[in-house]
């Protein structure tokens, strides 16, 4: 009886082994499992002992499969069949139309029936890369202070970006409101649209328009539009640096209580955008300089620098930053030229 059980167990083991895919290496080792495919000179096989592993194709003598699998060659020909390896490096592909003799080094790629071929996967990835996709960002903060003075404030911003392989469309807005001892100390907002198109890997052209208001500086409305060219100094996964310049138009309208006159003039538009992805966060710098052509001493300069620190909650981060808004003609109405805003904001990103 014991002999019968031993023979029965050995038979099961033999059957189990015979129906497993096998990789025979040049060093004499064998790897049993399920061969998933061959691509890029690597053979992927799923094993019971180590999950999915990769074996360098150049280290393999031959392979054997227990079920049909697709194989393709450098000539472009592809077949589906059971692979049978032998000790003399010969590899047979048993197809419905007959037997094909080859060797492991002549196989370009391989994949399981019902799965995309590596060539189809690469083509699908290229098509996906060509598609435009949306990315959104919203940031919000509340501030308050009591004691010698009472103050409260709200800051917010929103950005929606439609990006393709060769162009980018940005919609953005930001606003700051603050009240100190019952009087407004900050009340400004702006919104804009910016489109960039790559002429080459380095050069691009752009059009942009922005409008806003600043109650503290008596500006009921200010509008800037511009078009020009830009040059990208760096565009990698961790760094982006683009400098651009062009011609534009500035319009500014002030309240009846202001001594400043309405401005309507041609201008230059010079901008810098810098993004740096670090191990612990992301640094962003944006600068925009718009002097009038008639009088370079009449200009606006806006700068925003921020650092985003990711949180454990997916899509959320904390943003630390400061922004400077310099209006060279503010003194004409008895206002300070420079406004500086410091902020800490909660940021939500989603696609």
Image (tube, rainbow, N blue to C red):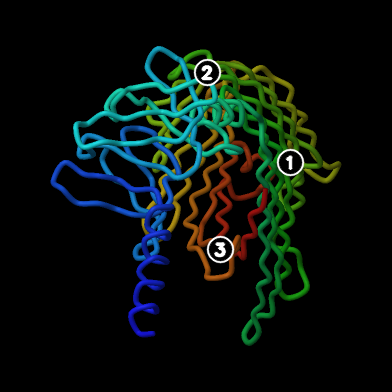
Mark 3 — residue? 317
Name the foreground residue: 101 vs 211: 101
Q: Position of residue 73 (x, y in %)?
A: 39, 20
Mark 2 — residue? 204
Name the foreground residue: 100 vs 202: 100
Disc on the earlier residue, 1 or 3: 1
Q: Position of residue 27 (x, y in %)?
A: 13, 46
Disc sitting over residue 48 in the figure? none
Quarter location, residue 161: top right
In this view, the mark in front (1 or 3): 3
Is residue 324 rendered to the left or right of residue 249? left
Q: Is residue 308 above or below residue 248?
A: below
Q: Is residue 23 above or below residue 130?
A: below
Mark 1 — residue? 191
Which corner quadrant holds the N terminus?
bottom left
**Label 1 element class:** strand
Q: Position of residue 318 (x, y in %)?
A: 55, 65
Is residue 174 rendered to the left or right of residue 125? right
Query: Are discs 3 and 2 less than 8 Å apart at CB?
Result: no
Q: Residue at x 59, y 35 (%)?
A: 300
Q: What is the distance, in whole Å, between disc 2 and disc 1 at their CAs?
A: 23 Å
Name the foreground residue: 213 vs 199: 199
Quarter location, residue 52: bottom left
Q: Is residue 203 above or below residue 48?
A: above
**Label 2 element class:** strand
């Amino acid at each position: 009886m014991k002999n019968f059980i031993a023979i029965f167990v050995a038979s099961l083991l033999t059957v189990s082994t015979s129906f497993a895919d096998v990789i025979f290496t040049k060093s004499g080792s064998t790897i049993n499992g399920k061969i998933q495919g061959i691509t890029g000179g690597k053979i992927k096989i799923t094993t019971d002992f180590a999950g999915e592993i990769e074996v360098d194709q150049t280290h393999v003598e031959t392979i054997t499969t227990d079920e049909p699998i697709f194989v393709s060659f450098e000539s472009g020909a592809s077949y589906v069949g059971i692979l049978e390896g032998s000790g003399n490096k010969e590899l047979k592909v048993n197809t419905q139309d007959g037997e094909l003799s080859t060797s492991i080094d002549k196989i370009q790629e391989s994949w399981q029936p019902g799965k995309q071929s590596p060539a189809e996967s690469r083509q699908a990835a290229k098509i996906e890369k060509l598609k435009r996709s949306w990315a959104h960002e919203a940031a919000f903060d509340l501030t308050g202070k009591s004691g010698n003075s009472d103050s409260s404030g709200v800051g917010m911003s929103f950005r929606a970006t439609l990006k393709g392989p060769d162009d980018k469309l940005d919609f953005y807005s930001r606003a700051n409101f603050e009240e100190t001892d019952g009087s407004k100390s900050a009340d400004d907002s702006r919104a804009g649209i910016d489109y960039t198109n790559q002429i080459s890997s380095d050069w691009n052209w752009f059009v942009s328009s922005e409008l806003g208001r600043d109650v503290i500086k008596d500006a009921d409305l200010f509008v800037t539009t511009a078009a020009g060219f830009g040059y990208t100094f760096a565009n990698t996964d961790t760094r982006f640096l683009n400098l651009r310049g062009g011609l534009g138009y500035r319009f500014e309208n002030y309240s009846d209580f202001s001594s400043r006159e309405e401005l309507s003039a041609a201008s230059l538009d010079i901008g810098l955008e810098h993004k740096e992805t670090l191990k612990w966060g992301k640094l962003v710098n944006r600068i925009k300089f718009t002097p009038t052509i008639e009088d370079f001493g009449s200009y606006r300069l806006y700068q925003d620098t921020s650092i985003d620190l990711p949180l454990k909650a997916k899509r959320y981060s904390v943003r630390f930053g400061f922004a400077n808004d310099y209006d060279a003609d503010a003194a004409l109405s008895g206002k300070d030229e420079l406004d500086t805003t410091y902020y800490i904001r909660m940021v939500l990103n989603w696609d």
